[in-house]
Amino acid sequence: MIRAAIAASLALALAACATTPESAAPARPDARSYAVTADAMGDAALARAAANGKRVLVVLGANWCHDSTALAGWLETPRFTGLVAERYELVFVNVGMPQTGDGHNLAVPQRFGLAEMKGTPGLLVLTAEGKAVNLDTAASWRNAASRSEEAIYAELTALAGRPAP
């Protein structure tokens, strides 16, 4: 009887450790959007931005990074796809693991003035002429998974350079 009670208690304790309460699960979508390509950031996005009166949103991340996949996931939701379609040309650039010296496509952030990437993701907003408008905050997105939907939306709206619709 005592053994059965001890076994049941242990089983309950292990079950509690093995499960995650629903409230602790991330309240965000995740997506894998960081493909490795030969032409990570051609000038096509800048040309489209110039033709359409938009800015370019360059997301510098990697599929191994939960913050990168969280940000990509938000950008795929209807609320964000509307904002992006109206105000931005969106480009995902795989930068690998720059913090360990195994970076990829690091010429892209350097081209637009972000000299160093210490983590992922980074987020650059460019004018159609290729001028970065957020170099002061571009590397601050390394906590994207813990940002709220509202905070991300507000910052992207502000960086778009025009009032929200």
Image (cartoon, rainbow, N blue to C red):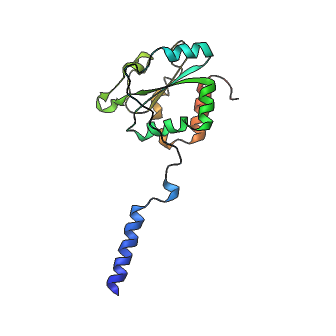
Image side of residue 47 versus residue 95, left or right: right
Tell me where residue 83 appears, x and y as whole percent: 62, 30
User: Toward the viewer: 147 or 38?
Assistant: 38
* Residue located farthest toward the right when viewing the structure as drawn: 165
For the question of whether residue 131 can be seen, the reply is no
In the rendered structure, the answer to whether residue 18 lies left or right of residue 138 reads: left
Q: Which of 119 and 45 is in front in this view?
A: 45
Query: Residue 18, percent across and down?
Result: 39, 62
Decide: is 136 above or below 11: above
Give residue 1's quadrant in the image.
bottom left
Question: Residue 164: x and y, percent?
Answer: 68, 29
Tell me the residue at 37%/82% (across/down): 5
Residue at image position (42%, 16%) is 111
The relative height of residue 5 versus residue 15 in the rendered view (above or below) is: below
Q: Is residue 62 visible?
A: yes
Q: Which residue lies furthest to the left in this view?
A: 101
Q: Across the whole image, how many numbered discs are drawn on residues?
A: 0
Q: Quadrant of the C terminus?
A: top right
> Residue 125: image x %, image y %?
53, 23
Residue drawn 64% across the image and 25% down it: 86
Q: In this view, does 72 lie above or below 130?
A: below
Task: Say which quarter of the image contains residue 19.
Answer: bottom left
Query: Going by the image, does 76 lie left or right of 108?
Result: right
Give whichever of 151, 20 is nearer the camera.
20
Q: Where, by quadrant of the figure, is residue 81 drawn?
A: top right
